[in-house]
Each structure stands twice: as C-alpha cells, then as structure tokens.
Amino acid sequence: MASVIIDDTTLRDGEQSAGVAFNADEKIAIARALAELGVPELEIGIPSMGEEEREVMRAIAGLGLPSHLLAWCRLCDVDLAAARSTGVTMVDLSLPVSDLMLRHKLNRDRDWALREVSRLVSEARMAGLEVCLGCEDASRADQEFIVRVGAVAQAAGARRLRFADTVGVMEPFGMLDRFRFLRQRLDMELEVHAHDDFGLATANTLAAVMGGATHINTTVNGLGERAGNAALEECVLALKNLHGIDTGIDTRGIPAISALVERASGRQVAWQKSVVGAGVFTHEAGIHVDGLLKHRRNYEGLNPDELGRTHSLVLGKHSGAHMVRNTYRELGIELADWQSQALLGRIRAFSTRTKRSPQPVELQDFYRQLCEQGTPELAAGGMA
C-alpha cells in the first residue's frame, strides 16, 4: 500500500484511559495540534456523554480544521440522535460482534445484531452522516459473522468496517490473516483498532496494514483504556521507515504534541518510551558511543532528525575513554591517554554512587584533582 489514513482517537479512546479527563481548552488544543500535524481523521468524542461533551465537539467542529471529524456511538437510537447535533460528518456505530459479548453484555443474538446494523446505518445515512461500523471484540468473533455484518452494513450505506481488538488479545500473524481474509471478502474500507495489553498494539496495527487495512486508529503516546492503544508516533515512524508507507504526518511536530498530551492527560511519558521518550536517542555504552562518533548510522535505527531531535551522548558507568576525551574537549580540555583512563575510573565510580552522569563543573573538579596529583603513577594511586 502506498498510503494509510490515520483516524486518531486520542480525544475519545485516549481520554477513556482511567483517570484521564481533558477540559474543553485541552481538547481543542489537541484537536488543533493533530490537524496541524496532518492527521486526516479525528474521533473527537462520545456524544451520549452529555451536553457538555457535545458542546466541546461542536467547538472543535467550528474550528474549520482540515481533518475529517468522527463521533463514537453505540449502535442505538439514543447515541445516533446525540451525534446529529455535534457537527461531525461521520459516526462510528459500535456493536459487539463476538457471541460472548452479544450474549453476556447485551443479552442479544446474531440475528438481532444484523437487523440493528441495517436499521441504524440506514438512519445515519438518511441523517447525512458517513458511517464506520465498529465491530467491538472482533478478535474473539466468528470471522464469517464479521463478513456478514460488514456486508449488511455496506448494503445499508456504510463505507468502512472497524476491526477492534477490544481486549488486546491479537498477535501480528493472526492479525495479518484476519485482515487478508476480510480484504478478500469485503469491498469496503477496513480500519484496525488495536489495544496494547500484551505490548503488541503497534505490531498488530502494522500487520493489519500488511493485510489490507486502509485506516488505523491511533492515540498520541499510546494513551487509552488499560494498557492503551497503538501509539500515533510509533505507527507513523514504523510505517514510513520499515514499510515505506506514507501517512502524511509531519513527524517533526510529534515531540510537541506528545508533550501536550502528556500534560493534559497527567500521564508521564516513560524515559525509554519509543520515539518520544526523553532517553531514546541517549547513549552511554562505550562501544555504541565510539561507533556513533565514527559514523552515525553504526548505531542509528531511527534518525532523530525526523523528529527534530538529536543524539545525546552521556558519561556513565558504561562509557569508554573515547567519550571521555570528546567530552573534555568540549570543555576546552585536551587529555592525554593516561588522563582519559584515570578520569574514566573516577566517572564510573561517581555514576555508580550517584545514579547520574557528572555535570560539567564536576568533570572540571575531577580534572583539577587529577592535575594536583601529578604523575600517572601518583594519579593511579589517588584513583584507587
């Protein structure tokens, strides 16, 4: 596939993360930022939550953003009616498709589901709304039944079917097979909605695209229910760099929107979080630093330039003499080989004791102490 359309759900499923609650200004700011990033579709809320939610959705619709706006609804009359006044142009009408959820969540059967799909999709189309039929718990459903649901929805006017791995139990090989099966049987847009309960949401999303998905659900920083959803930043960079698939996203704007969502959600991004974590382009190990200093691509899988970031080299327990010499050179100090080795011992001991890298003033203190000790032999004794 040459391109994939991102339908970002940070403002819907992202906000469903336990304890997360965006205020109106935050939701508007996130919507603007996503649109500026180039995200073509935004799922901006749940109309049935009440008038306050609908008011914010109308405010976002009134911004005139270039992004296509969707509302998430249960497949029922009340939710569809609530969505009509929000200003969105498309609804995701969500229905459980697994026998488990049909029986134990709704106390309904497959025949009822098919009738409601036909009826509600038709009503949504008559109201002038585009329709994505959301298949909740699709990963635990009979695939033949999903095809029947999709066919009925399409006949009623739906343009898209969303395959939701609601409880995050899919793995990439199975997801690839599922989407190949659906692509062979259905002539409509296919969207994947992956959850990260086993840490596989991004991998499952990529597999779905390989199997024929035209649209993917993402959230900034992987925010979402339980372990979260497929992360926008991971999917965008992986599709681009690993599969040559364009999403039209301005990747240099990703760090800023990551920080915005981090503040608004109160969910801190881990230091080693892929793509957007503070430490993902930070290097300490001597063999890696030496390789990077010789040629960046020796230890560079993802180019930080794509995100407007840079590599950061830090001194610590695992550093080597090459890094020590370079760091002191930046401080205006040229070291002899014996000085580099002597200072490396001091730096390693300091990092082990303090659990951090030494600051420039501390490095200068180490050098001054070394100079006061004089000869290599005396310095070696002083470092013991």
Image: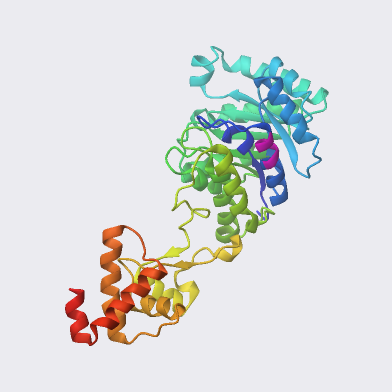
**Would residue 156 be found to the left or right of residue 357 on screen?**
right
153 or 197, which is in the foreground? 197
Q: Where is residue 303 drawn, in percent x and y?
A: 55, 65
Q: Quadrant of residue 47?
A: top right
Q: Quadrant of residue 230?
A: top right
Q: Quadrant of residue 123?
A: top right
Q: Where is residue 314 drawn, in percent x and y?
A: 41, 67
Tell me which residue sits at (48%, 45%) in the image. 172
Tell me which residue sits at (38%, 66%) in the image. 284
**Quarter of the C terminus within the rendering:** bottom left
- Decide if residue 287 is in sight here: no
Question: In this view, which residue lies farthest toward the front?
Answer: 372
Tell me which residue sits at (21%, 75%) in the image. 383
Q: Main secondary structure of the magenta part?
A: helix
Q: Where is residue 130 drawn, in percent x and y?
A: 77, 31
Q: Where is residue 16 drawn, in percent x and y?
A: 56, 30
Which residues, given as a range, are shown in magenta? 25-29
Is 154 above or below relative to 173? above
